[in-house]
Amino acid sequence: MRSAIRTRAELERVLQLTEAECEGLRQVRRSDQRGDDRPDGRTDMVAEARVGMPLLVTPYYLSLIDPEDPTCPIRRQCVPQVAESHCVRGDLVDPLGEVAHEVAPQLVRRYPDRALLLVTSTCAVHCRFCTRSRWVGKKEGYVPLTTLEPAFRWLQAHPEVREVLVSGGDPLVGSTGRLEGLLRAIKRIGTVDVIRIGTRVPVVLPMRVDDALVRMLRCYQPLWVMTHFNHPRELTDLSRAALCRLADAGIPVMNQTVLLRGVNDSDETLAALFRGLVRERVRPYYLLHADAVVGTGHLRTSMETSLALYARLQGRLSGIAVPRLMVDLPGGMGKVAVGPETIVSRKPGRTVFRSVGGENVTVFDPEPLMGIA
């Protein structure tokens, strides 16, 4: 992490940057000029809304980039583009409505039986499609346990919440001792049955998954690790070794893949990824239609593309290799499986879904940005 690439000068030692990347890097330097976003997470569609998340990529993940290919799928995930400064219809600063659903500091509840605990704003890589780009990279370090005490008290007072998803940022970026202190505090809440850890560390910093970390995690079962592989190129020898350590320790691992334009929007790529994950004893869990985060329209697919890709995977792969195609509805209305039972209507550029609460919610396709690939 101390060697992570954070500046254009450091990046240029490895990559010959395109004009769009150079301008994107100039934009993200102005991280304090996002403007006054509305508290509901919406943003002015006319303004330049996305000037925010700074560059950060580990040397390991950078080494996976093909330096001769400006369209490299790893490169598109971590190198800023000028397109990030543009908004399209439906873009939101907080697409999942987490701010509106915060029940205690750092604790978000959108479902009856589970809650999300945001424990750090630090990641090993700043993914350009990050759902929490409003927060990630703005401050570094774990949230102190003292700050999380109101969240622990809230969970203690609400025994109907049986599962806690620990996320951020990336919880595994912190030290093993600090993470253990957090898990111990959650386990003291006797009504919490299961802990889930959301992490991209096995993808972007796999050497972090060492024997000491795995031994510690075993002490807090039932505990599930939710990884985030998006492309088969990410399944390297090091990442497969990290997944093997977790599986050998009896820790269930599932993967959530985000469908991204120019990264994995082909059935061949997705099939290779899902087969590769199953070989490493990782269950492909969700294929997520990308969240409408402000400034990510160039990376999102249309709903029609997502449905067509998913249809081509059916029957081509075994059942354990096919994840569920999901969309996380705007405004914190929850995840729904994409299918006839949830789609109310479709028109060009928009799809209306029925939420788990029975409400109709519109999801817009990203509009083309003139002159931007």
Image (spheres, rainbow, N blue to C red):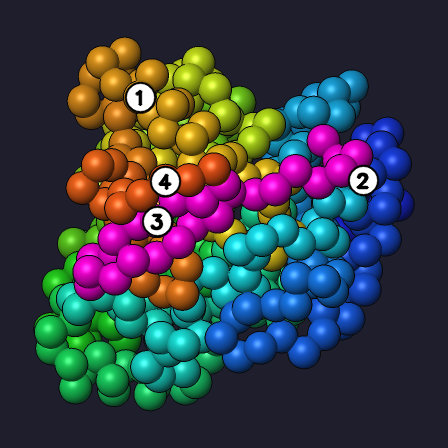
Residues at marks 3 and 4, CA–CA distance in whole angstroms: 6 Å
Residues at marks 3 and 2, CA–CA distance in whole angstroms: 34 Å
Residues at marks 1 and 4, CA–CA distance in whole angstroms: 17 Å
| Residue 268 visible, this angle | yes
User: Which residue shows up at 77% across the image and 57% down it?
Assistant: 28
Relative to residue 14, is residue 121 drawn left or right? Answer: left
Please provide percent x and percent y for residue 33.
77, 71
State which tag comes first along the sequence, 1 or 3. 1
Q: Main secondary structure of the magenta part?
A: loop
The quarter in which the C terminus is drawn is top right
Magenta span contains residue 363: yes
Which residue is the site of mark 2? 21
User: Which residue shows up at 46% across the image and 79% down it?
Assistant: 144
Residues at marks 1 and 3, CA–CA distance in whole angstroms: 19 Å
Tag nearer the camera, 3 or 2: 3
Q: Please, what secondary structure does the residue beneath circle 2 have?
A: helix
- Cβ atoms at labels 3 and 4 below 8 Å apart: yes
Write the start and end of the magenta stretch as one range.
Answer: 349-373
Q: Residues within 10 Å of mark 2 (few under 14, many from 20)?
A: some
- Cβ atoms at labels 1 and 3 below 8 Å apart: no
Q: Residues within 10 Å of mark 3 (few under 14, many from 20)?
A: some
State which tag comes first along the sequence, 2 or 1. 2
Q: Please, what secondary structure does the residue beneath circle 4 have?
A: strand
Report which quarter residue 117 is drawn in. Answer: bottom left
Tag nearer the camera, 1 or 4: 4
Please provide percent x and percent y for residue 177.
41, 65
Which residue is the site of mark 3? 352
Label number found at residue 311: 1
- Cβ atoms at labels 1 and 4 below 8 Å apart: no
- Cβ atoms at labels 4 and 2 below 8 Å apart: no
